[in-house]
């Protein structure tokens, strides 16, 4: 009797849904079965299709990986909430009530890292290991400027018929432009069951929520005592690189990696270096 071959590529991970409290979350999962999965929290305007397969696949070689759409995003139902704290509550419901997990490892990027912090602060026992990339703390300096930067780079991208991520995530030098093109191409590797693009309403709600997060009182990050890996580029225009330093100082025992000559998407530009580091950090 032949067994079904295991899925080893994010491009082929099955699209799934789960109902929680009258809402439906869209998600994908693959990798070895285990009691503690790695749950990925994605960035502003992103859907399931925005994770770099080179990073997710590297982690899924030894870990069970789950990616999901927040409510109001992609194929998930509902509306995106007006605060990231509420988005963290939604994520908690998805993880604990929808999928039934009581312990996870958490990988986050950008806005996902902000939601991740709110989740860990409120439910510190849920998360075993934490990865925070391209992100910053609640109330962080200049965090609220992400809105202006985002709209400006969307305009630049429109004028050059480019993907906004090429401007938002990467430096505009030769190395950055080359990395940007390669990253955007990798995101196209999945050709079946692709997710729905984010709606303008949800995108605007996310921007407002990030702005509120940036202008609100800081969280007490001393409650984050689990192993934490922080990474960014040295020239992040969206979430200023200094905020990664701030997180490192406030989360005791955390590890910080700053990649040279790179921006918000440093982990994608330097995926060949970062993917094995992240996979090792998240290994059991």
Image (tube, grey):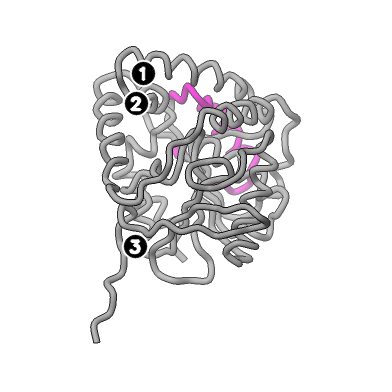
**Could you give the CA–CA distance between mark 3 and mark 1, rounded to whole angstroms?**
35 Å
Quadrant that contains the N terminus: bottom left
Q: Residue 163 carries which label?
A: 2
What is the C-alpha distance between the residues marked 1 and 2?
6 Å
Mark 3 or mark 1: which is in front?
1
For the point 47% across and 52% down, the residue is 67
Q: Which of 258 and 266 is in front in this view?
A: 266
> Is residue 255 at least partly visible in the picture?
no
The residue tagged 1 is 157
Q: Is residue 6 visible?
A: yes
**Considering only vertical position in the picture, is 172 above or below 106?**
above
Q: Distance between the residues labelled 2 and 3?
A: 29 Å
Give whichever of discs 1 and 2 has the lower sequence position: 1
Residue displayed at 34% across by 62% down: 61
Residue contact between numbered discs 1 and 2, judged by CB atoms under 8 Å = yes
Residue 60 in picture, x, y percent from top left: 38, 60
Could you say whether the residue bearing mark 3 is in a helix, strand or loop? Answer: loop
Which of pointers 3 and 1 lies earlier in the amino acid sequence? 3
Q: Give the mark nearer the N terminus: 2 vs 3.
A: 3
The residue tagged with tag 2: helix, strand or loop?
loop
Image location of residue 102, percent across then percent down:
63, 66
Magenta residue span: 235-257
Residue at x 62% of width, y 22% of height: 144
Which structural element holds mark 1?
A: helix
């Amino acid at each position: 009797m032949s067994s079904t071959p295991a899925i080893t590529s994010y491009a082929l991970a099955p699209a799934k849904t789960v109902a929680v409290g009258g809402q439906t979350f869209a998600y994908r999962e693959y990798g070895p079965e285990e009691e503690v999965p790695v749950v990925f929290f994605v960035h502003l305007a992103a859907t399931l299709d925005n994770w770099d397969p080179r990073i997710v696949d590297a982690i899924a070689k030894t870990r069970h990986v789950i990616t999901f759409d927040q409510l109001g995003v992609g194929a998930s139902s509902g509306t995106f909430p007006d605060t990231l704290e509420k988005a963290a509550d939604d994520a908690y419901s998805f993880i604990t009530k929808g999928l039934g997990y009581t312990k996870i490892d958490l990988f986050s990027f950008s806005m996902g890292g902000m939601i991740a912090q709110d989740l860990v602060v409120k439910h510190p026992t849920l998360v075993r290991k934490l990865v925070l990339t391209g992100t910053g703390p609640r109330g962080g300096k200049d965090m609220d400027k992400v809105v202006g930067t985002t709209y400006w780079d969307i305009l630049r991208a429109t004028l050059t018929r480019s993907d906004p991520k090429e401007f938002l995530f990467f430096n505009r030098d030769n190395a950055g432009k080359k990395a940007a093109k390669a990253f955007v191409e990798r995101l196209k590797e999945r050709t079946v069951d692709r997710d729905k693009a984010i709606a303008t309403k949800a995108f605007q709600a996310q921007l407002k929520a990030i702005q509120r997060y940036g202008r609100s009182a800081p969280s007490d990050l001393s409650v984050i005592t689990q192993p934490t890996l922080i990474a960014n580029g040295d020239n992040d225009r969206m979430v200023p690189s200094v905020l990664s330093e701030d997180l490192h100082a406030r989360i005791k025992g955390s590890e910080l990696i700053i990649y040279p000559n790179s921006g918000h998407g440093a982990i994608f530009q330097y995926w060949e270096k970062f993917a094995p580091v992240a996979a090792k950090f998240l290994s059991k």
